[in-house]
Image (tube, helix red, strand yellow):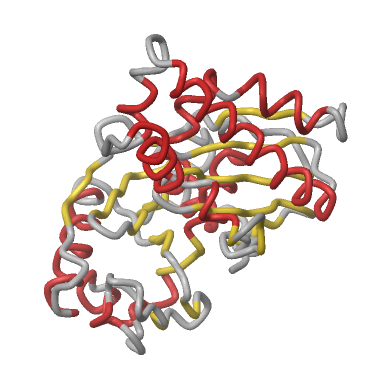
């Protein structure tokens, strides 16, 4: 007998797929069902579909579950299930294909049992569904990592705000709010190449230049959020992604910047980690109107 209170949530990244069973009533991932599999995003469509389908089948092997929802990067026709990704150095062999139908055939599911939702919106929907944004009605979310993800939640709908290329300072927002800004800035100040923000954060206690970089980032983020908040009027801002793990190093500067203009705004850190997108995607089946692209 099919269990409609459980759905499979999956998150498609550039190098991996994660998936798990989500209890839609308890708003929790079922213990022991979370998996991660590597994916060659430059592989053939047959190779990619095989990895994705095997990961999903592995998750549901002991459960009678038909409903599947995938958090997918864009551009994508989420309703029809057609991949529109091109010129992004990933999944180029899926362009123009109906992923919903291909995956349904591999899973022996009906296509209508598979949903595709935007990955940025899924992150925020997950935090609304069972994380740090639970109970709020008007929210904006940022994922800060190798790229910049932006999303909004309003009137029960999570949507991709797509502000990564928003004109900002001398370029676009992502130029100043992603890992590459940190590595470039550190190289400018020191002449040293560094791998990423985690490595940089470990130097913060002994290198004043690193403290300066995080303070500059806090101001950059505050300036960007000031514009985003003015557009969306949220109750709370949710920060996720790997850079948010170093929040303590730019918290004071960020709050000083943004709360000078918006003293009532709350800044919260996402608590679900990589589970957020899985829970957000799966929650589509609790109310299949709340995730927009």
Q: Nearer the viewer, residue 281 or 73?
A: 73
Residue located at (75% from left, 37% from top): 136
- Nearest the camera: 146 or 48? 146
Vertical position of residue 210 compared to residue 70: above or below = above
Rendered residue at 40%/15% (across/down): 207
**Does residue 199 lie above or below 66 as drawn?**
above
The reply, left or right, for residue 205 in relation to residue 154 is left
Give the total of numbered labels: 0
Report the side of 146 relative to 57 (left or right).
right
**Residue 160, x across and y down, in percent:** 61, 61
What is the quadrant of residue 16 in the picture?
Answer: bottom left
Q: Is residue 118 visible?
A: yes
Indicate the position of residue 189 as horizontal and vertical percent values. Answer: 42, 34
Which quarter of the rendered picture does the N terminus lie within? bottom left
Left/right placement of residue 7 relative to residue 50 reads: right
Q: Residue at x 35, y 44 (%)?
A: 21
Looking at the image, the residue that sits furthest to the bottom is 96
Quadrant where the C terminus sits is bottom right
Is there any visible trace of residue 69 in the rendered image? Answer: no
């Amino acid at each position: 007998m099919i269990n409609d209170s459980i759905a499979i949530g999956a998150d498609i990244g550039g190098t991996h797929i994660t998936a798990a069973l989500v209890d839609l009533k308890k708003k929790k991932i079922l213990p022991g069902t979370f998996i991660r599999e590597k994916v060659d995003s430059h592989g053939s469509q047959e190779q990619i579909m095989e990895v994705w389908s095997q990961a999903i089948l592995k998750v549901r092997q002991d459960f009678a579950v038909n409903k599947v929802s995938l958090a997918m990067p864009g551009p994508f026709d989420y309703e029809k299930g057609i991949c529109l990704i091109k010129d992004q150095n990933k999944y180029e062999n899926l362009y123009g294909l109906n992923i919903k139908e291909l995956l349904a055939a591999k899973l022996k599911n009906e296509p209508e049992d598979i949903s595709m939702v935007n990955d940025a919106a899924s992150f925020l929907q997950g935090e609304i569904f069972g994380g740090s944004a639970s109970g709020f009605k008007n929210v904006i979310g940022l994922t800060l990592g190798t790229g910049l993800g932006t999303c909004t939640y309003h009137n029960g709908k999570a949507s991709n705000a797509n502000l990564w290329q928003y004109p900002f300072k001398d370029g676009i927002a992502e130029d100043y709010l992603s890992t590459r800004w940190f590595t470039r800035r550190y190289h400018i100040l020191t002449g040293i190449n560094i791998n990423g923000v985690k490595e940089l954060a470990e130097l913060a206690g002994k290198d004043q230049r690193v403290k300066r970089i995080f303070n500059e980032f806090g101001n950059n983020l505050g300036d960007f959020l000031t514009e985003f908040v003015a557009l969306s009027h949220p109750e709370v801002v949710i920060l996720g992604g790997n850079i948010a793990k170093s929040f303590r190093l730019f918290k004071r500067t960020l709050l000083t910047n943004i709360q000078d203009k918006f003293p009532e705004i709350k800044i919260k850190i996402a608590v679900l980690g990589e589970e957020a997108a899985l829970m957000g995607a799966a929650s589509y089946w609790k109310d299949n109107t709340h995730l927009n692209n």
